[in-house]
């Protein structure tokens, strides 16, 4: 019985002794988990909200940034959520402490009225590859100039000329006048064929676009530009892609434009 009491007392004393030893030895050193370095590219704002904008040829917004890191930053790619958004960057590499900006532009005449929200993805590298998402918001007014369609595609493989039309509609009380139209390609003929009120009472001008029957093989990127008497819309431009016959390859196969 005395042996059992002694053993029990020893068992109770063991945790106490362990606690004393741990206190004397001090806290154990734990491995330090390395912190993930912060991105070197710091933007002044991640969302540009212009609210309702007045009618005009285009709207612009700016995303200002600074390299707050200790190594150079290289912007490798800028990807907009919509083809109508045209981001621009002056250069790719920014040294520590250097500032820059990304400019985004929207051709308002190619967009429908109402609230618009776009995204811009910025891929860059400092100590590692990184990605940043930016937002661009605005509201286009109802009474503005609209160009339809936003772009033209012509598959020219039959050998016969192809005719398409562009309409420029102005819902304002004092509409603009399209004074001329042209194309950047000799394969395309452009002519103003009429102007007047549509069924909604808006002023509408129609432009006929004729693509030549015989075009070189491959895909040709050009545009149609219309000139107006309105300083807010001096030029209205519509992209045009002409897809000719497939280009023959060395192996005798053909690459068809997609």
Image (spheres, rainbow, N blue to C red):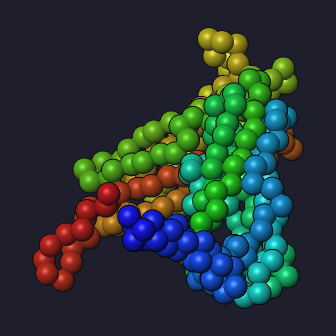
Placement of 3 over or under 243, stated as above or below? below
- Residue plotted at (70% across, 85% down): 24
Q: Position of residue 72 (x, y in %)?
A: 72, 87
Q: Which of the 4 quarters of the picture holds residue 214?
A: bottom left
- Residue plotted at (80% across, 56% down): 45
Q: Nearer the viewer, residue 94 or 197?
A: 94
**Residue 9 visible:** yes
Q: Position of residue 191 (x, y in %)?
A: 58, 42
Q: Quadrant of the C terminus?
A: bottom left
Q: Position of residue 179 (x, y in %)?
A: 74, 41
Placement of 75 over or under 224, stated as above or below? below
Number of on-image labels:
0
- Residue plotted at (84% across, 81% down): 98
Q: Which of the 4 quarters of the picture holds residue 39?
A: bottom right
Q: Nearer the viewer, residue 33 or 168?
A: 33
In the image, taking residue 161 as reference, residue 232 lies left or right, namely right
- Residue plotted at (77% across, 68% down): 42
């Amino acid at each position: 019985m005395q042996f059992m009491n002694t053993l029990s007392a020893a068992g109770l004393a063991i945790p106490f002794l362990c606690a004393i030893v741990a206190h004397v030895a001090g806290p154990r050193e734990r491995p330090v988990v390395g912190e993930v370095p912060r991105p070197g590219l710091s933007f002044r704002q991640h969302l540009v909200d212009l609210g309702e904008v007045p009618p005009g040829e285009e709207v612009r917004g700016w995303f200002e940034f600074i390299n707050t890191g200790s190594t150079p930053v290289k912007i490798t790619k800028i990807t907009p959520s919509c083809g109508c958004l045209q981001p621009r960057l002056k250069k790719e590499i920014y040294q520590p402490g250097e500032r820059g900006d990304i400019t985004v532009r929207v051709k308002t005449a190619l967009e429908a009225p109402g609230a618009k929200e776009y995204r811009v993805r910025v891929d860059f590298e400092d100590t590692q590859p990184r990605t940043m998402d930016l937002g661009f918001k605005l509201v286009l007014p109802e009474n503005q100039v609209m160009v339809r369609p936003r772009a033209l595609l012509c598959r020219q493989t039959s050998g016969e000329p192809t005719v398409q039309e562009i309409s420029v509609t102005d819902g304002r009380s004092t509409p603009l006048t399209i004074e001329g139209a042209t194309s950047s390609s000799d394969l395309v003929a452009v002519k103003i064929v009429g102007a007047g009120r549509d069924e909604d009472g808006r002023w509408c001008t129609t432009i006929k676009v004729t693509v030549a029957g015989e075009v070189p093989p491959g895909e040709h990127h050009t545009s149609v530009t219309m000139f107006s008497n309105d300083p807010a819309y001096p030029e209205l431009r519509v992209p045009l892609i002409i897809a000719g016959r497939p280009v023959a390859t060395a192996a005798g196969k053909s690459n068809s434009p997609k």
